[in-house]
Amino acid sequence: MIYSVNGEVTHLEQNIIVVECGGIGFECRSTASAVSRAGIGEKIKLYTYMNVREDAMELYGFVDESELNCFKMLICVSGVGCKVAVDILSSLSPQEFALAVVNEDAKTITRVKGIGNKMAQRIILELKDRLKKNNSFETSDIPRINLGSAAGNAFSEALTALMVLGFTNAQAQKALDGLSAELTVQELVKEGLKRLSGK
C-alpha cells in the first residue's frame, strides 16, 4: 500500500493533484484545501489512501495525517463513501469536523453540499458509537484534570475530538498532558494537533 507521495506537482484540477515521484505521476484525489495549497512546479507531500473497487483504483491524497485519519473515520460510516468524505473535508477542516461530532452539532455538518440532517446525525452517532466500542472513549485517565470542572469538560471534549481524528486514547492524552486548564476546547485541539504532528 502507498503510504505517501513526495514530489513535484505537475497538474492541478478540481479535487485532483498530480504528483510526480521518480518519473511516475500519481493522480491523487484531494480536498479543496489541499488543492488550494498546491502549486504547479512546487514540492508537496501527500499522505495517501488507496481505494480499490471492482472497476477502478483511486488514490486519495491529504496534506497531513489528521486529514487522512479523519477521512478514514468518515468512510467507516454507512452511506459515506470516499467522494462524500472528501466533500466534507473540503468544506470543514478536520478540527472543525471533530468538534462538530463532539458537540453533536449536525447543523455545521449540513453546511456541506449534499449532506442533509439525517446523514449528519448518522455520522455523529456512528462515530461516537465507534469510539465507545473501541474502548477509547474513556476520559478518566487524563492526568491532573478534575473532569467535574469546566476545564475538565474541555479536556474531555478535546480528547474525544482528537480520537475522532483517528488518534488513539493514549496518543490524545499524551498530546493534551500539561496544557493550560484555561484553554478552550478549540485551543486544546489545536495545540494537541501541533504536538502530534511534531511542530
Image (spheres, rainbow, N blue to C red):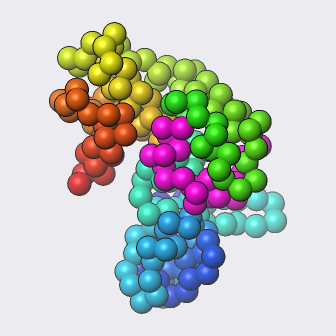
Which quarter shows the C terminus?
Answer: bottom left
Q: Position of residue 122 (x, y in %)?
A: 71, 33
Q: Picture quarter containing residue 117?
A: top right
How many marks overall?
Answer: 0
Is 97 inside the magenta-drawn segment? Answer: yes
Q: Which sits in the foreground, 77 or 152?
A: 152
In the picture, the quarter occupied by the N terminus is bottom right
Q: Position of residue 111 (x, y in %)?
A: 65, 50
Q: Quadrant of residue 73?
A: top right
Residue 38's place in the image compared with 145, above or below, is below
Q: Quadrant of residue 154?
A: top left
Q: Which of 136/160 is in front?
A: 160
Residue visible at 44% across and 73% down?
A: 37
The answer to whether residue 89 is visible is yes
Residues drawn in magenta: 75-100
Q: Is residue 100 left or right of residue 80?
A: left
The residue depicted at 52 percent of the width and 73 percent of the height is 35
Q: Measuring 54% from the left and 38% from the top, which residue is drawn there?
A: 100
- The residue closer to the viewer here, 94 or 66, is 94
Toward the right, the furthest residue is 55
Query: What main secondary structure does the magenta stretch of the protein show?
Result: helix
- Tell me: 30 left or right of 120: left
| Residue plotted at (42% across, 89% down) | 41
| Residue 177 visible in image | no
Residue 145 highlighted magenta (yes or no) = no
